[in-house]
Amino acid sequence: MHKKSKKPTMLVIAGARGSGKTHFVEKLKTHRLDLGVYISTDRIIKLAVRKYADIPINLAVMRGKIVADYLKTRCLRNGYSFTFETLFERKANVDFLREAREKGYFIIVIFLGTETHLINKRRIARRIAEGGNLVPEISITEGAIKNVEYFVDAIRFADDVRIYDNSREIKSGLFRPLLLMSKSKARWAIRAPLPDWLSEAFPALEFLSNDRNN
């Protein structure tokens, strides 16, 4: 994904619920990329539910986030390379990237977006039907609204950024991400025509305009 560096690497897969983060990570694994320690809040939540059948879902979600945060902090403090998924729904996520930057990490942020949150809802509904999702639907649009704002703040601390449109579904459960924009060595490049959902976010990304025009 990037040239080998002596620095530890932190790979952040960001996007709203149903944007295809876990599927994207699985695709990276097929390319035998070194993800370091992989931390998945969803997997932690599922393990908790399987182990404690009577645990309320909201409590499982809360504990899953606590455990994931603990694991990320341990990796950061010990200088391990690691990968995690996030909604960027909390300012703490931005602060975490700032701390990693201060500790000398090489930070890669990948953001997955979709044309409309209805795509996310359909995907999550399918996962629920298959028994693979535990998060209430009300959280879908809430995450989608917040993560764009925090994403803009977070990428200031990233060395490498890639923004994908993950709306296209080749077949059930199989997506084809389209690379829209990337940043490397502090310069941005437009890789494909920007869709409406991303163009509408650009007032918040005003600081990119100079690089976009170079």
Image: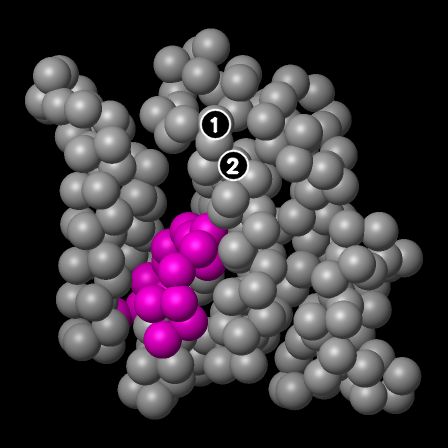
Magenta highlight on residue 82 = yes
**Residue at the image point whose x is 47% and y is 10% from the top:** 129
Q: Position of residue 90 (x, y in %)?
A: 39, 60
Query: Where 51 sits versus 68, above or below?
Result: above
Identify which amino acid the numbered label 1 is placed on.
Glu
Q: Is residue 183 above or below residue 12?
A: below
Residue extending furthest toward the top: 129
Residue 210 appears at what percent x and percent y?
A: 82, 88
Please tell me which residue is depicted at 67% across the width and 30% down the height of the picture.
119
Q: x, y percentage for residue 139?
A: 46, 37
Q: Amino acid at mark 2?
A: Ile
- Name the secondary structure under disc 1: loop
Q: Quadrant of the N terminus?
A: bottom right
Q: Which residue is mark 2?
A: 140
Q: Give the residues in magenta.
A: 80-95
Q: Is residue 123 left or right of residue 33?
A: right
